[in-house]
Image: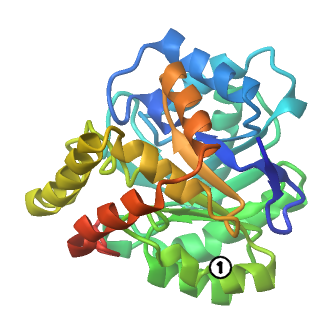
């Protein structure tokens, strides 16, 4: 495993990092023992950055991750979670957005208890565009100032956001000081808009975390969960790309991970899995060369959905 400096955070992170959303049964029901084993396999293979959120599976992902990290020295991993978006246990999509000082502080205390830690290397302010952006200004003022306050107190190492819309990213990069940025679904086979952010990220020392190399499961043989907002027509283009890869004796997910994770200008790419065998495969394929001829054909199939935005 190779490691890169994550902007000005002071963290030297693995090129592949582990997203714990799958531990919360966000994409499919998972077995807890397999999920825990997935975390251990990731660490054993050299992955040293783990990201989670209280909204994933209604606190389930944090709960399972806390069990997986029990007894593992804190020096073995960097850890981030998110604040501002909370989901009731056992539900998906029934979100409460709370960017108040009290809400963020209480939420972080609860996350710390579930995870068994007292310090987070990064905190991402989560999904400030949700619910028609009616809470965006709240997040950029009280929410942001609260996380900066937590950093000054030493409970948090670095301040970040975890959002989707590119226009909001450009505004954040221009108007507030952040240490890192978790940009999801914008550097994958069907969307490369993250490249637009890289020059200013380098200039300001913002550490880029590239999330969702599988485009929230659009770039998998299984396909996305029912909640994904892509239309049936859009999903058809992804199915066609997956079928083409199968016809060539490989999988769309393999190509997707290689494409997303092998760009030398992106410090780390975050994938999620609750299957230990899948974790091993992802690390293995990340370290193998991408088939450039296949890549060109698949990206041609995906041209109708290139850089298309969905309302998550």
Does 281 sit above or below residue 197? above
x and y, in percent, of residue 285 in the image: 55, 40
Image position of 90 (left or right of 101):
left
In this picture, is 54 found above or below 177? above
Q: Percent position (x, y) of residue 108?
A: 67, 44
Front in this rendered view, residue 112 or 23: 23
Say how many tags the image has. 1
In the picture, measured across the screen, residue 152 lies left or right of residue 237, that is right
Quadrant showing the C terminus: bottom left
Residue drawn at (80%, 14%), measured in percent from left and top?
71
Residue at the location (77% across, 68% down)?
Answer: 179
Percent across and percent down for residue 68 are: 66, 19
Q: Badge 1 is on which residue?
A: 198
Residue 253 seen in the figure: yes
Q: Secondary structure at mark 1?
A: helix
Q: Residue furthest top?
A: 33
Res 156 visible: no
């Amino acid at each position: 495993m190779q490691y890169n400096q994550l902007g000005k955070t002071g963290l030297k992170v693995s090129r592949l990092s582990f997203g714990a959303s799958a531990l919360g049964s966000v994409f499919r029901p998972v077995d807890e023992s397999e999920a825990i084993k997935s975390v251990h396999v990731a660490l054993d293979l050299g992955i040293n950055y783990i990201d989670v959120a209280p909204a994933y599976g209604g606190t389930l992902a944090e709960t399972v991750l806390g069990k997986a990290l029990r007894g593992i020295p804190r020096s073995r991993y960097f850890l981030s979670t998110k604040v501002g978006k909370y989901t009731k246990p056992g539900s998906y999509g029934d979100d409460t957005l709370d960017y108040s000082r009290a809400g963020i502080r209480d939420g972080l205390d609860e996350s710390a208890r579930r995870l068994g830690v007292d310090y987070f290397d990064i905190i991402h302010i989560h999904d400030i565009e949700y619910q028609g952006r009616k809470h965006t200004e709240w997040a950029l003022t009280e929410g942001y100032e609260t996380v900066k306050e937590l950093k000054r107190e030493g409970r948090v190492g670095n301040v970040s956001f975890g959002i989707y819309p590119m226009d909001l990213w450009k505004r954040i990069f221009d108007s507030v000081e952040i240490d890192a940025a978790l940009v999801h679904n914008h550097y994958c086979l069907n969307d490369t808009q993250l490249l637009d952010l890289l020059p200013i990220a380098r200039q300001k020392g913002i550490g880029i975390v590239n999330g969702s190399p599988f485009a929230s499961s659009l770039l998998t043989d299984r396909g996305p969960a029912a909640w994904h907002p892509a239309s049936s027509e859009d999903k058809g283009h992804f199915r066609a790309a997956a079928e083409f890869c199968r016809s060539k004796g490989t999988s769309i997910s393999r190509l997707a991970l290689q494409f997303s994770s092998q760009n030398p200008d992106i410090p780390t790419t975050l994938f999620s899995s609750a299957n230990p065998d899948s974790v091993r495969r992802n690390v293995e394929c990340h370290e193998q060369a991408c088939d450039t001829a296949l890549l060109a054909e698949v990206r041609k199939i995906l041209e109708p959905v290139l850089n298309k935005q969905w309302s998550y």
